[in-house]
Structures are given as structure tokens and as C-alpha cells.
Image: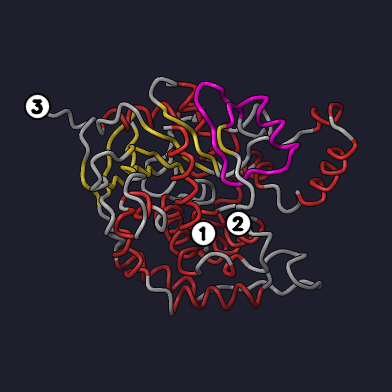
Amino acid sequence: MTDNRTAVRPFRIDIAQADLDDLHDRLSRTRWSPQLPGSGRERGVPVAYLQELAEYWRSEFDWRAQEAALNEFPQFITEIDGLDVHFVHVRSPEPDAVPLILTHGWPNTFVEFSKTIDLLADPRKHGLDPAQAFHVVVPSVPGFGFSAAPREVGMTPRRVAEMWLVLMDRLGYRRFGAQGGDLGAYVAPELAIAAPDRVIGVHLDGGVGMPTAADVPTMTPDERAEWDLMQQWMTGVDHHTLLRAAPQTFAHGWTDSPVGLLGWLMHKFNEFAPMVDRAEDAIDRDHLLTNISIYWFTNTAATSSWPMYNGLGDGGFVWPKGQKQVPTGVYGGGSALMLRLAQRDNDIAYWPEGNTGNHFVAMELPAEHAADIRTFFAKIR
């Protein structure tokens, strides 16, 4: 007899029409704030910009089309540690495909990888070398999207990694690769730390070799100049502090008002796309709104805040810790300073030059992202 707690159950996204109607109604009745003095985004998301985006969300964005596209991916639910975990599982038609688990970031969902999955799973269909193919697993992190939220404090990237090990075992994958950026850049190394005999390698979008104030005394004059320049770039709303201190307070507004949620998430997506004027200049607008819609329909603005209040550091933000158990590759690479620091804590097997893109590269440059993953795993296999 199958244990229902460990069963892998098929899942399809099916948002009730009443919920879609409610979203449209709330958007139509928005009480807009006045535009504060200033220009551009120096006071936050401009009113006129958000009004135009909200109207597009209400009257032009086709949720049903996006829902149908997402449902083209095989999706499932399984219970791990008492929590229902949602995941996409696309098996490659290639017999020698490598299992690969991808972990999304914040404020994202599994939708982060929706343009990358097929490139990885079926390269032959896209005119790519079928020798580098993957069985792709994309779980929704607990508290995000269609995965159940933690019921108590203590969820951490290490605990997520332990859940992912159970998931991969349940799918029959003893050996596999791990990939992620943002929050995923914390979870993927933890997989290698927890089970180095199972993880082939770790590919990260970034966050490796980032200097801290503790590194300043060891820096050369040129490295110190680079550090000083980095301090000018690291600006914006500190969501780590905000969501560590009072996530429940702010989530009341994000949960009750779709425009409140839209403004907050677009503020962050714009900050995460510093190479362009607006996030939509790098990431398709419908892709962004699909992600935001999932936050709205699943009511996860609050539950997705756990990485900031108990997950990423003891009382404050820290960069992902390294691991030397398995090889690491990085999409973004970086300067000689960052490489030196990355090698201190990681077995760096792949550090490319020339890759470009903003924070969520899988959404912005899916072909380049998939190519980089393929190159890394070809190098270490």
C-alpha cells in the first residue's frame, strides 16, 4: 500500500474564476497615493508608472494563457517533513541525461526557470548538443507559491536542502547536480555539504566571492578601490532588514492590496535589474506579472519572508557560505578579488568571463543561462 504522506501526486494550477474576478475588482478600486516631490524613482515606484502597470495587469494581462503555459510542465505535490511541496519534474528524452535540481530565489517562484527548463531537458529540440541534457526538477521553496508554508520558526536553507535530498531520492535520483541564484545560491551549496556523495557539482548565478568588511585588511590598494566602488552600488531598500524586523506588519498591505504587492515586488525587481532603466526592459512584462500573480493567488507575500527572519544569518544578512566538497561553477564570475575570495571557501572549477545579465539571469537570458549550466556540467562530468 502506498503511504499517502510520501506519494507523488499530480498537480495542475487551477485558480478559481472568483479569485481572478476579485483581483480585477480590487485593481479597479485602487486608492492611489499622491506622487511625492522628486523625479524618477528616488521616492520609490512612481505613481504614474504603477498605474499603467496595474491597468495592464487588470485589463490586458492574460492569466489563463499563462496558467495554461505553466500547466504544460508536469507538476506534482509530495509531502516532506509534514509540508506539501510543489515541484515541476521534466524528464529528458535523452537516455544519459543528468538529474538537476534548480532552486528559485526571492521574490520569485518556480516561474523563474520556466524559460530555461525545456532548453535543459530537451536540447535536441532546440538544435543543441543532446549529450548535455538534464532531467529537470524545480521545487517551490516552502512558503512560496504552491508549497506549504513553514508552521514554526527554524526553516533555513540547510533544512530546505535536506527536504530536496528527500525529494530527489523519492524521484529515484541518487546522483544529481544542483543550481540556484539568490535564495537558491544558499540552498544549492547546502545540498553539497549535506550529501557530497550525491551532488555532482553546484552551479550558482552569483553571490560567490563577495567581499565583506572583514576582508578589507587583506586587500591590495586596487582591491580596496574596488571595495569602495561596490559600496556605492549596494543601495536600495534593504529587504533583509525590513523582512527580518516586521514581515507581518508589511504583509498586511501586500496581502490586502494587489497594487501594494505589485509596487513592492516591482520595486525589488527594478533594483535587481541595475543594468536597465526598468525591469521590463530586461524581463518580459508578462513573465514578471505571472510571478507576481502567483504571490497574489497563493497569499504568500508573508510566508515567503522566512529567509530574512531566520534563514540567512544569525541576526543579519550574510553571503552564502562556501563548500569544497564538490566543484562549483558561477555564471557571473567576477573580478580577480572575487575569484580570490571565492577560491578560499570553494573548489572553483568554472569562472567564466564575459557573461552578462542582471540578478535573475534565468528570466532575462534563458538561452545564455542554460548554455552556462551545460558548459559547467560538461566540464566536471
Q: Position of residue 296 (x, y in %)?
A: 45, 58
Give the mark nearest the N terminus, 2 or 3.
Answer: 3
**Residue 295 visible in this rendered orientation of the protein:** yes
Where 204 sits versus 107, above or below?
above
The label number, if any, that marks residue 1 in the structure image? 3
Front-lying residue, 375 or 241: 375
Helix, strand, or loop for circle 1? loop
Q: Give the residue number, with chain letter if any, for mark 1.
A: 365
- Which structural element holds mark 3? loop
- Sequence-first tag of 1 and 2: 2
Under circle 2, the secondary element is loop
Q: Which residue is drawn at 54% across and 51% down?
A: 107
Q: In which quarter of the image is the N terminus?
A: top left
Residue 153 can be seen in this image: no
Q: In the shown orientation, is residue 177 left or right of residue 276?
A: left
User: Which numbered disc covers residue 83?
Assistant: none
Q: Magenta segment range? A: 321-348
Instruction: Give the x, y percent position of residue 208.
Output: 63, 36
Residue 306, compared with residue 162, is above or below; it is below
Which image quarter is the C terminus in? top left
Q: Which amino acid does label 2 sit on?
A: Gly
Disc 3/disc 1 C-alpha distance (Å):
45 Å
Q: In the figure, 240 relative to 217: above or below? A: below
Q: How far apart are marks 1 and 2 (CA)?
A: 7 Å
Circles 2 and 3: CB distance less than 8 Å?
A: no
| Mark toward the viewer: 2 or 3 | 2
How crowded is the residue under tag 1: few (<14 C-alpha within 10 Å), some, or many (20+)?
Answer: some
> Residue placed at 38% from the left, 73% from the top?
62
Q: What residue type is labelled 1?
A: Leu
Q: Residue at x 65, y 78 (%)?
A: 48
Residue at the spot of label 2:
357
Q: Where is residue 71 in the image (x, y as percent from the top left)?
A: 28, 58
